[in-house]
Image: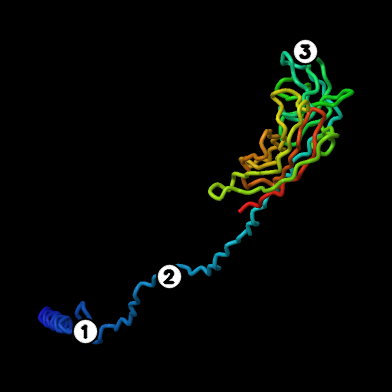
């Protein structure tokens, strides 16, 4: 091929390349719809807190027992002794026929005398002295080796006043409470005339009124004395032991009676 023909050949070939280049696909394809992205956008799933199945709280109640009532202890029985030794501390101590300062006098005990006690009253502080003739002294004037409350109660049940051979007992006429103060009791009885020579001395009382009365919640044995056929004393409510009393006529040989007092009831 000559040079002119080669030039035509190469010129035609270049023209074909140029036209082809114009129809080549572009860098961005446009012959199809862009792929449809079917993405389901779900809201972020929040994991709910785990639901724990809680059993209802069961409270265990321990039943509380009712308070135990403590029984009131019974009073402890005081042991009883046969006798107690004692020593007289007063210069001269009267030992009397009855458990009180107004009963007939039997004999005197000097200071330092050693005595033996074999009984007591149930309500005052007099104790019984052993001997050929039993008599009573005030425990305030002796030194007792032991507790006098351990002595047996001898009055009124275990000891009797000497009986008068010359007089009869009196008769109680009335026993009444004061209308304005019901704790005050007045007792009246028939009068007895003491014959001349039958008095122990000028200080002797002819009536001994023994009363077991209540005062301040305590039962008291109170031997009262009078030369008149009447006496007034206190007797309050509030004691377990019923109040009671009696009247003796007293003369130097002994005691006439007793005449029981019909005790007035508490209002």
Marks 3/1: CA–CA distance: 151 Å
Q: Quadrant of residue 138?
A: top right
Out of 129 and 199, give the one closest to the viewer.
199
Asked whether the viewer can see residue 82, the reply is yes
Marks 1/2: CA–CA distance: 47 Å
Q: Where residue 188 sits in the image (x, y, percent)?
A: 67, 44
Out of 30 and 62, give the one closest to the viewer.
62
Q: Which residue is mark 2?
A: 48
Marks 2/3: CA–CA distance: 106 Å
Out of 44 and 17, give the one closest to the viewer.
44
Query: Could you tell me which secondary element the residue under label 3 belongs to?
Result: loop
Whether residue 64 sits left or right of residue 118 in the image: it is left
Q: Where residue 156 sits in the image (x, y, percent)?
A: 80, 38
Query: Could you tell me which secondary element the residue under label 2 belongs to?
Result: loop
What crowding class fits label 3: few (fewer than 14 Cα within 10 Å), some (14-19), or many (20 or more)? some
Q: Quadrant of residue 36?
A: bottom left
Q: Which residue is mark 3?
A: 112
Nearest to viewer (mark 2 / mark 3): 3
Q: Where residue 236 sits in the image (x, y, percent)?
A: 62, 45
In the image, farthest residue toward the left? 4
* Residue 132 higher or lower than 209, as above or below: above
Q: Which residue is mark 1?
A: 30
Badges 2 and 3: C-beta atoms under 8 Å apart?
no
Compare marks 3 and 1 and give the one earlier in the sequence: 1
Query: Could you tell me which secondary element the residue under label 1 belongs to?
Result: loop
Compare marks 2 and 3 and give the one earlier in the sequence: 2
* Residue 257 higher or lower than 204, as above or below: below
């Amino acid at each position: 091929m000559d040079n002119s023909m080669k030039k035509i050949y190469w010129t035609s070939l270049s023209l074909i390349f140029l036209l082809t280049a114009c129809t080549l696909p572009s860098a961005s394809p446009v012959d199809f719809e862009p792929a449809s992205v079917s993405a389901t956008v779900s809201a972020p799933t929040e994991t709910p807190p785990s639901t724990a199945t809680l059993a209802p709280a069961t409270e265990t109640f321990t039943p509380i027992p009712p308070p135990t009532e403590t029984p009131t202890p019974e009073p402890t029985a005081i042991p009883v002794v046969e006798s107690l030794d004692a020593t007289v501390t007063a210069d001269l101590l009267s030992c009397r026929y009855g458990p009180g300062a107004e009963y007939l006098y039997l004999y005197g005990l000097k200071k330092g005398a050693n005595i033996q006690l074999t009984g007591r009253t149930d309500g005052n502080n007099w104790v019984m002295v052993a001997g050929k003739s039993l008599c009573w002294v005030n425990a305030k004037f002796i030194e007792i080796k032991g507790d006098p409350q351990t002595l047996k109660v001898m009055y009124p049940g275990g000891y009797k006043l000497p009986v008068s051979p010359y007089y009869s007992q009196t008769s109680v006429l009335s026993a009444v409470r004061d209308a304005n103060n019901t704790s005050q009791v007045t007792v009246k009885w028939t009068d007895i005339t003491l014959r001349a020579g039958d008095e122990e001395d000028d200080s002797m009382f002819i009536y001994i009124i023994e009363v077991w009365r209540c005062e301040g919640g305590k039962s008291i044995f109170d031997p009262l004395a009078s030369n008149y056929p009447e006496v007034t004393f206190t007797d309050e409510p509030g004691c377990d032991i019923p109040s009671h009393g009696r009247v003796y006529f007293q003369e130097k040989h002994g005691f006439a009676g007793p005449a029981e007092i019909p005790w007035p009831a508490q209002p």
